[in-house]
Image (tube, rainbow, N blue to C red):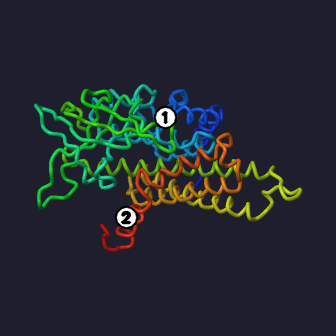
Amino acid sequence: MNFEIAVEQAQMQETARRIAMEFGLEYWRRLDEAHEFPLEMWHALCSAGIAGASLPVEAGGSGSMLDLVLMLEALTENGAGLPLAQLFMLNPVFGGRAVSAFGTDAMRRDLLSGLADGSVLMSFALTEPNSGNNALDIRTRAMPHGDGWRLSGQKVWISGFDMATHLLIVARTSSPGPAARKSDGISMFLIDARRAGIKAARIAKAGTHPVSAFTLFLDEVEVRPDECIGTLDRAWPELLQLLNAERIVTAAGLVGTGRLAVSLACAYVRERRIFGAKAIGSYQGVQFPLARSAAELDGARLMNRQAAWLMDAGKPFGREANAAKFLAAEAACAACDRAMQVMGGVGYAAEFHVERLWRDARVFAIAPVPQELILSFIAVHELGLPRSH
C-alpha cells in the first residue's frame, strides 16, 4: 500500500488551506450568526478549481474523489467547517457525480461547466416526513403526463434549496408488484429548482446555519422526459452510489472539523494557567482527551481515504464509505465535546468557535444516515447476522 500523497495533491491541499485561512474562523462565525450562505467563499473555491475537482477530466476536474477528500480535509481543518462540506455533498456528488455518471449528453453539456464555475448550485430531495430513513417507502409520485410526468408529494430536510438553481429529486414512478423487489419503481429527476408547483418552508435548526434546510411541497410539478436522470424505474443502485459518495464527503468534513476543534483547544490550554504557574495543557487530565481524539480522527481519516481510493478505482466502496462516516461522526462529535470541556466556560462562548463546531458536527451523527443504521448494515452484510428490520 502506498500512503504517499502525490505532489499535485499536496499542491491542491495547500491551495485549499490558503483559501480557508484567508476567509478564516470569523467569516464563518459571522455567517453562522446571520444565517448567511457562503457564496463569496464558494466562488473563490470555484475560481481556484477546487469546487469542480472531482468532475471528469473533460469538464476540467481530475475525476478523483480522493483529491476532493484531501482538499475538503484541508478546508475544514483550517476553519471552513461543516456547512462548506454540505456544499461539497450537494454540488460535486448530487450534481457533478450524478450528471457525469448517469446524466444524458445534454445534461453533461449544459451543467458540468456550471457546476465547476459556480453558476449551477444543486439541492437534493430524497427524505420525506413519513418515510424517514426508509428511502424505499417514499410516497412522492411521478405520474405519467403526456410524454413526461407530474410530481406530487412532500420532501423534508432539503439543504440549500433557497440558493439552488437545480434540484435532484427522487420519486416513485411505479409501485413494485408482489414478486418484485422493493427498490423497483424508484427514479430520479433533475429539474430547475424554481419550477412551478414547488413551495418551500424553512426549518429552524440548531446548527449548520449558513446552509438552510427546507420542507418542500410538490403539487403537480411538470417534469419533461429529458429530465429523467439514470434508469427509469431502476435508479435505486445508481442512487446508492451517490449516497455512498456522500458518506465519503461527509466523513472528510467531519475529520477536518474534529481536527480543527482539537487544534483550537490545544492552542487555548497551552496558554491557560490556573491553580498555579503551569499551563493546564501540561496536565494529563487535559492532554488525554485531546490525544484520544487525535488518534480517533486519524483512524477515521485513513478509512475514508481508503473508501475514496476504492471509488476512484471502480471497486465496491459502500462498506468502507459507511464505516468511514460512522467513525468520523463518532470522532468529530467527541472531539468537539472534549475540546469544549477542556476549555471550560470559554468553550461555550461563540467567540472561541468550538461551540459552533460542536453544534454543526452533532447533526452528522443523525444525517445523512444515522449511526445505528450503519451498524445495522455492518451487522447484516459483514457479520452475517439476521436482519433486524
The local secondary structure at tag 2 comes to helix
Residue at the (64%, 37%) spot, across then down: 25
> If the image is split into quadrants, where does the C terminus sit?
bottom left
Residue at the (25%, 27%) spot, across then down: 196
Q: Position of residue 60 (x, y in %)?
A: 45, 31
> If the image is split into quadrants, where does the N terminus sit?
bottom right
Q: Position of residue 210 (x, y in %)?
A: 51, 35
Residue at the (57%, 60%) spot, across then down: 299
Identify the residue position indicated by label 1 in the image. 51
The local secondary structure at tag 1 comes to loop
Residue type (three-letter) at the residue carrying disc 2: Phe
Q: Position of residue 257 (x, y in %)?
A: 58, 48
Q: Tell me the quarter of the picture where residue 294 sits.
A: bottom right
Identify the residue position indicated by label 2 in the image. 377
Left or right: 389 in relation to 141: right
Left or right: 131 in relation to 379: left
Residue type (three-letter) at the residue carrying disc 1: Ala
Marks 2 and 1, how far apart in space?
31 Å
Q: Tell me the quarter of the picture where residue 142 sits.
A: top left
Residue 242, placed above or below residue 194: below
Q: Position of residue 361 (x, y in %)?
A: 53, 50
